[in-house]
Amino acid sequence: MNKVILVGRLTADPVLNQTSSGIASCRFTVAVTRRFADKNTGERQADFITCVAWRQQAEFVSRYFSKGKSIVVEGTLRNDNYQDRKYPDVTHYSMNVFVDNVEFAGGKNDNGGSQGGNSGYQNGGYNAPQNSYGNNNYQAAPQQQAQPAASNDDMAYGISDDFEEIIGDGDVPF
């Protein structure tokens, strides 16, 4: 199975191109922050992954995404090999994600900063798991205050004149 799911930020504004036959394509790069920080420096490294979208997905990406915006990309990984024009004996290899689906990752106030609505994505990277399994120092989840149940008087019902009442199971048409 070949399936790729990426969550990251665009490194530049996507550019919409068209083939000679009029099919829309869009190439963009997603910066995906690695899950854990480097032991020596404490910094998180990122991978820069090239994605290619076609047709409606390409138009969608070029219209609604820009540099720094959070994005979720679902697609397949493809290997593109080609011969160098200047040096025919040299083969270049590149890996691209061919996009099947694209979704917004941040909240509506996502402007490339850390205000996005994606709870696990802060300050440009994923937070390391915050647990202490080795210490058996578990914390209980915060308790939510119970809401009073709504009474039937508080609910608004639609007009039931258009519906027929079914008395027993024998009257059900299916």
Image: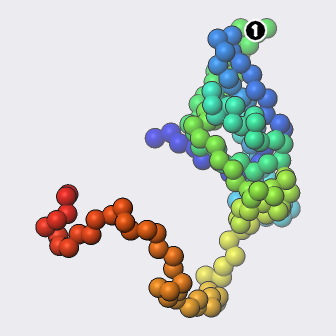
Locate residue 40, reporting x and y percent: 83, 63
Residue to which mark 1 is pinned? 85
- Quadrant, the C terminus: bottom left
- Residue 123 in view: yes
Q: Outermost residue toward the front? A: 161
| Viewer-proximal residue among 93 and 108 | 108
- Of residue 116 and residue 151, the one placed in the foreground of this image is 151
Quadrant assignment, res 129: bottom right
Q: How many marks?
A: 1
> Could you classify mark 1 by the number of other residues whose Cα lies within 10 Å: few (under 14), some (14-19), or many (20 or more)?
few
Where 98 sits versus 65, above or below?
above
Q: How is the image coloured?
A: rainbow
> Residue 82 versus residue 12: which sits nearer the camera?
12
Image coordinates for residue 49, horizontal then vertical, percent: 72, 39
The x and y percentages for residue 106 are 74, 56
Residue 76 figure quarter: top right
Q: Eyeballing the image, is 4 above or below 77? A: below
124 left or right of 173 in image: right
Q: Residue at x 66, y 79 (%)?
A: 131
Which element type, helix, strand or loop, lies under badge 1? loop
Q: Residue furthest left?
A: 170
What amino acid is at disc 1?
A: Arg
In the image, what residue occupies the spot 75% across and 34% down?
62
- The x, y position of residue 137, in whole percent, is 64, 90
Q: Is residue 155 left or right of residue 33?
A: left
Residue drawn at 79 percent across, 29 percent down: 15
User: Looking at the rendering, which quadrant does residue 24 occupy?
Assistant: top right
In the depicted structure, whether residue 159 falls above or below residue 2: below
Q: Is residue 6 left or right of residue 111?
A: left
- Residue 32 at least partly seen: no
Which residue is at 71% across, 66% downward? Answer: 119
